[in-house]
Structures are given as structure tokens and as C-alpha cells.
Image (tube, grey):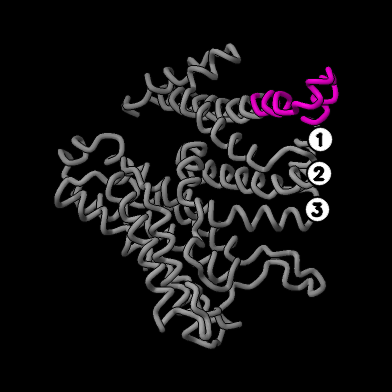
Amino acid sequence: MKIVVTLRKIAERIARTSSFRLTLLAVLSAMVVGAFIIVLSDINKLQNGDILGAIKTVGSAYWALVIGSVGSLRAISATINSATPLILCGVSVAVAFKAGLFNIGATGQMLAGGMAALWVGFAMDGPGFVQVPLAVLAGALGGAAYGAIPGILKARTGAHEVITTIMLNNMAGFLVLWLLKTNLYQREDRTDPISKLVTAPGHLPRLFGFMDNRPDLIAHAGFVVAILAVIVYSWFLNRSTTGFEFRAFGMNADAAQYAGMHTKRLTVMAMMFAGGFAGLAGSAEVLGTYGYASQNFAGNIGYDAIAIALLGRSTPLGTLFAALLFGALQAGGRQMQANTDVPIDLIVVLRALIVMFIAAPLLIKAIWRIKVEPTSLGQAFRGQGS
């Protein structure tokens, strides 16, 4: 018995290492393809036969990417600020993935949570230690309530969550536009859809607020909320009964139902949890980054979160590191564009390439000529008695 348990642990550890290696190789492959794109897009140097100069452009671009993301305290602050909503929305998509669901509606849930947090942000005027937690909680509840809608539709009518969440994204955008034109939300003496300002006590504190002479350090306490969310997600997934039911339901819904699990309840709960994490991302943006809301304050974060959850394989640490990588790319992309002629659009291409390689592990194995047989070993021992 002990030998079987030991072999199983070794096999699972090797499988995890193999999965991590594939992820790293996917990122490396994307960077290599990105380098070729940079060289081919440098038309002037190619026409003059200056191939070496085009290759140097690749080095300059990637070096600027590093400097712009972690090369200074300001760069690190920008990376943290970019990664904060990505972490929260990444966890939102990941928790739905674990339950076998596709949460394409993180953008709409983020908008709903952000507007709920915003109301508390400008309706109260302190004290901050009360107002900020209430606003963050309101964001989580707003996102959870909006996420429950596709969950209920899925459980009661069988409506596919991909379709309903996409439609709810559009509905949330129009709802925000309408709210920003009402007297409740619209800023005084403004005719455009812009919200009232969050009161000073309602702002999320700056992480580097002790440095009064550095207003460019924009990272805020939403990053702490994001890290706590990852910890809660990890505990919930691995230590709680409901988390176990989520994983069982995601692996085999029929088996979970046969085992007596309430699959409809799990469907609704999974989408509520997903919406709650996305709502936290919305509250972090309006309370920390902007201090107000416009129609598109969520941007494309909800869709980027899908790539992050895939890259992180829906694990807590994997999602965290994937979001930090995407945040670093976004922050460093500005420096890359400023220092070289390489446009910031390359970052979008790199993200797409990373997702493509992650979605095609057999392609990675073929390119790098690796064999990942330990995964089958882990599967052989999985399910055997201890």
C-alpha cells in the first residue's frame, strides 16, 4: 500500500513538473515567433539588407519590455496595477473552469460589481476603514448577483453559459451607460456618461503611499485583495467540501450527480463565485485605479482573463503567475513602444501566441521534441486504492 501511495505521489509531482515545463515552453515559443514578426516588420532595414540591425531591434524591444515591467519601482508599480484586475478576473474564469463551466461573462460581472462598489464609494464620506471594506464587499456581491443569472438559466432551462454570459456582457455595457446618465450616478455639471468621483476616504490606499513625492507609483491595495482572493480560491478548491464538489462536478457531471451531489445548485454557486471574483476586479478599478467610472472601465480584461486561466491551467498559483506575466507584458509594452519602433500591438500578438501554444501541447512537444510520458504514469496510478 505504502509503495503505491509513494509511486502515485512521485508520478503526480512529475506530471505537474511536465505541465509547468510545457507552459514555459509555450511562452518561450511565443517569444521566438514574436522575434520573427519584429524582424519581418522592420521593412526599412530588410530592404537595405541590414538583417543584423533588424535582429538588434528584437533585442532592444525585448530588453525595453523587461525594463518597462520590472526595471524600476515605477515599472513594478505599473505591472502590479495592470495585473490586479487580471488576477481577480483570472480566478473568476478559473473557478468556473474547475466546475466544468465557461465563464465568458467576467466583463459584465466586473461592470456590475464596479458600479455597486462605486455607489458606496461616492455615497459615503468615511471613515475609510468602514467605507472601503463595504465598497469592496458591495463589488463582490454585485458581481455574484450578476453571475448568478447565467447560472440559474443553465440550471433551470439548460441555456448554455457561453451564450448567456456573452449576451449579459452586452447588457451590462448598456446598463452602465444608462446608469451613468441618471442623476444617481452622473457627475454634476456633466452631460457625458461619467460618474461621480469616489470620496477621498473611499479610495483604495496606495501601496507606496508612504512615498509622498512619487505620485507616479499608482499600485494600490487592490493588489492585496487580489492576493487574498488567490489564497481563498486555493483554500476553497483544496480544503472545502464545496470545492471538492466543484472539482468532481467539473471532471464528470454524471458521476457527481450519481454520487448524490446537487448539480444544479453547484452550477449556480460556481457562477456566483466566478461573478464575485470578477466583481472584486471591478471594485479595484473604480476604487483604486480610476476613482470614478466611465462606460468602458472594464476594457477587455474579462476576455484576457480567459487566456490567463488557460495559461495558469486554472490552478491558484498558475493563474497568479499568468496574470503577473500579462500585467508585465502590458506595462512593458508601453516602454517598448517608446524606446523602439515596435508597436504595442505586438503584446496582443504575444498573448495570442501564448494561448495558441498552450491550447496545442502536441505542437509544443513536436517543436521541442520532448516526450511527456510521466503524465500517463500519473493517470495509471490515479484512482488506485491507498
Measure how far apart labels 2 and 1 are at the Cα level.
8 Å
The spot of residue 191 in percent (x, y) is 49, 78
Q: In which quarter of the image is the C terminus?
A: top left
- Mark 3 element type: loop
Q: Does the magenta stretch include residue 35?
A: yes
Magenta region's main secondary structure?
helix
Measure how far apart labels 2 and 3 are at the Cα level.
15 Å
Amino acid beneath label 3 = Ser
Front residue of this view, candidates 5 and 21 = 21
Measure how far apart labels 1 and 3 are at the Cα level.
17 Å
2 and 1 marks in contact (CB < 8 Å): yes
Residue at the (66%, 46%) spot, across then down: 328
For marks 2 and 1 on the same chain, the one whose residue lies earlier in the sequence = 1
How busy is the neighbourhood of tag 3: few (under 14 within 10 Å), some, or many (20 plus)? Answer: few
Q: Quadrant of residue 78?
A: bottom right
Q: Does the magenta stretch include residue 34?
A: yes
The spot of residue 134 in percent (x, y) is 46, 77
- Up the image or down, 12 lies above or below 370; here it is below
Point out the stretch of residues depicted in magenta. Answer: 33-58
Amino acid beneath label 2 = Asn
Front residue of this view, candidates 236 and 94 = 94
For marks 1 and 3 on the same chain, the one whose residue lies earlier in the sequence = 1
Q: Which residue has dot 3 on it?
A: 72
Q: Which residue has dot 1 on it?
A: 60
Q: Which residue has dot 2 on it?
A: 339
Mark whose residue sits in front, 1 or 3? 1
- Compared across the picture, whether 123 is left or right of 220 comes to left
How busy is the neighbourhood of tag 1: few (under 14 within 10 Å), some, or many (20 plus)? Answer: some
